[in-house]
Amino acid sequence: MVRSLMLGAATLCVVAPSSAIALSVAPSGDATLPPAAPDDAQGADPNRRDTQVTIGGDPIVVTARSMARSTANVLTSVDILGGDIAQRQNVDNAWELFARLPGVVLTDFNQGTTSGRFSIRGFSGEGEINAVKLLIDGVPSNDNAGRMDFIDLVAPLDIASVELVRGTSDPRWGLHAIAGSANIKTRIGGTYLDARGILGAFGTYDGQIATGVETGRFSQNFTLSYRRTDGYRDHADLDRLTLAGKWFYDFGGARLGLIARHSRSTAQEPGYLTDADAYTDRRRSYAVSQTDGGTRNLSQYSLHLDADLARDLSLTAVGYSTTNHDDRYVRFSASVAQQRRLTDEQHYGMVAGLHWHAADWLMAEAGGDVQWQHNRSLRWTSDRRIITAATRDQDFDLTVGGAYAQAIITPVDWLTITPAWRIDRVSGDFLNVLNGRHYPVNDYGTISQPKLSVALTPVPGVTAYANYGRTFQIGAGSGAYVVPPRVRDLAPSINEGFEGGIKLSQGRWLTARAAVWQQTASGELRRRLNDPSGEFDNLGETRRRGFDVEASVQPLPGLSAWGSWSHQKALIRVPDPAAPTTAGNEIDHVPRNIYTAGIEWAPATQPWRASFWGNGQSSYQLNTANDQGQYGSYFQLTAELAYRLTPAIEVSAQVRNLANERYEYVWYDGAQRLHAPADPRSLFGAVRARF
């Protein structure tokens, strides 16, 4: 069976008869391990069931059987961002890179280390419901509530690709994978030196170095990244240092590796503006915010094993440890006190999968993961960073373990059927240190998640697919435990979804995909973000539905264009009895429309390239009552021009928000609307050297 993957500017050819994947080394150092003999290659299969769409880069062709836990085995809407696109972006935070992917909503708080996040499939990035499983090189990287703080561990220059999986049919992940998953793959293997320096608006300077040294069977990769900016708004300084080291050894039939990452960020917070000031003095930061800000320290260590146990049996296993120490002072408005928020989380886990090629028409996979957490969450009221009273001291453990099995059945060349089943179990203990009381975790029972995917290729280059699946949501923090006034166990919220789509591939010149989808939830929970006890509200039964359309064309060598449109609507079908008037209302901060579009001209015979692209969204409601108006619409444009001085050195200029669009993130605190203005037009210059 043939699979195709895209990992940026590199071309990868995999031609192994066994289930292991061997990767050719690209000049950018995106891949590892030497290829097998060329005479094993069979070429691309025009009838393969491929539902992936890639943004950027030349193809990496895989002509071996896919390994355990591979995204190539997932028959749903998958988008892959190439490393060549990610590496050349100028962003303050790695989550901003997801602007290049279709159907992604960006929530830009622009508040220091709590800068923002991305979301998909009708969920918002507010933090009340975090619905995307984040992975870094396959390592689970969400915090207890599902937030994406650990994305700060990744430097853009170190990214090989980003895989975004949408929907409910992927059995590989349980906890936090309510609407899908995102796996950021970094550069492993190869011999290269890649450095990039950036200078630009708002006192920004950025330096990144990525290097790889591969000698025989042993490879080492290192990344050092530092970014400093004053920010567009007053009192918005950011200072971040990121380090990573990766060591891998190939034993022939197995590869063993160690990855270590660390990030330290210190930032000020400009706070939010009222309606009166949001459009007149956008750079302003109120006096009440002048001591707001914080420091975040993140670490992640992981062991990776990929092995051929037999000719047709492969194993993938990962063990990991992550820590998050976040110390933040924040005051949202003059009417509330400043808070000190201290988060100290330690996560440990194991992820494994076995992949068996039983026959030409049958592949089977079984796997699972166990994620242990020991967390501490403390809050105080404070006055200019002087503590006045304790409002929270929670010490809790949470264990979530899951297992899955799936089969990939190809009874005829043009049809693939993938049934799967996943189950998860939850355990834990909660201590309220302020009163010394322990509370048990909710008895969620065995959380059962059946899944089914079907794909067919009626003619070469056309893949039609459909899938069904269930995912789940449990409470975050104290919401996962039987804490008074609750006296009985709560059931998990079950998300049930389906999708139908079609993908068209016509050589290099055209790739397109369209899909319709729906996702419903029973008893959806949303965290009370400002609640001292960390409790939640019952949003009720919800329904999200929409469609996605995307296409990319290459009419001429060196010329490419792309565009996407996602339409979505998220509604409360059956409300919480305490809020009956919200029935039929839209869920807040979910725009109905999301857009991306762009064009790039990079002739192979010329030393220059030029690109012009944009992303945007329509407006959203500010609360579930739908009575505060709609805000947040925008379409921002970015232009870039680059020139190669030598084969190894490139200079570039990038203008962000080219049309100087005045837009912002807006939320409602129950008394007033609060605004965080986005950056205006800004210019950045960069020099990149690759050897």
Image: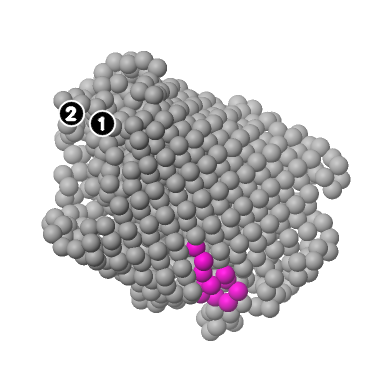
Q: Quadrant of residue 254?
A: top left
Residue type of the residue flagged with mark 2: Pro
Could you tell me if the residues under marks 2 and 1 are in contact, i.e. CB atoms within 8 Å?
A: yes
Residue pictured at 13% horizontal, 57% vertical: 556
Circle 2 is placed at which residue position? 38
Is the magenta region chiefly helix, strand or loop?
loop
Residue pictured at 30% horizontal, 34% vertical: 23
| Residue 141 or residue 168, whichever sits in front | 141
Q: Quadrant of residue 141?
A: top right
Tell me the element at label 1. loop
Residue type of the residue flagged with mark 1: Pro
The boundaries of the magenta stretch are 227-237
Crowdedness near tag 2: few (<14), some (14–19) or many (≥20) residues, C-alpha within 10 Å: few
| Residue 406 or residue 187, whichever sits in front | 187
Name the outermost residue toward the front: 215
Q: Is residue 344 left or right of residue 637?
A: right
Measuring from the top left, give residue 353's x and y in whole percent. Answer: 45, 25
Can you say whether 196 is above or below 168 in the image?
below
- Tell how many labels: 2
Can you say whether 307 is above or below 376 in the image?
above
Can you say whether 127 is above or below 220 in the image?
below
Measuring from the top left, give residue 234's x and y in whole percent. Answer: 58, 77
Residue pictured at 44% horizontal, 61% vertical: 207
Measuring from the top left, give residue 506's x and y in whole percent. Answer: 16, 44
Residue pictured at 53% horizontal, 79% vertical: 282
Q: Quadrant of the N terminus?
A: top left
Circle 1 is placed at which residue position? 35
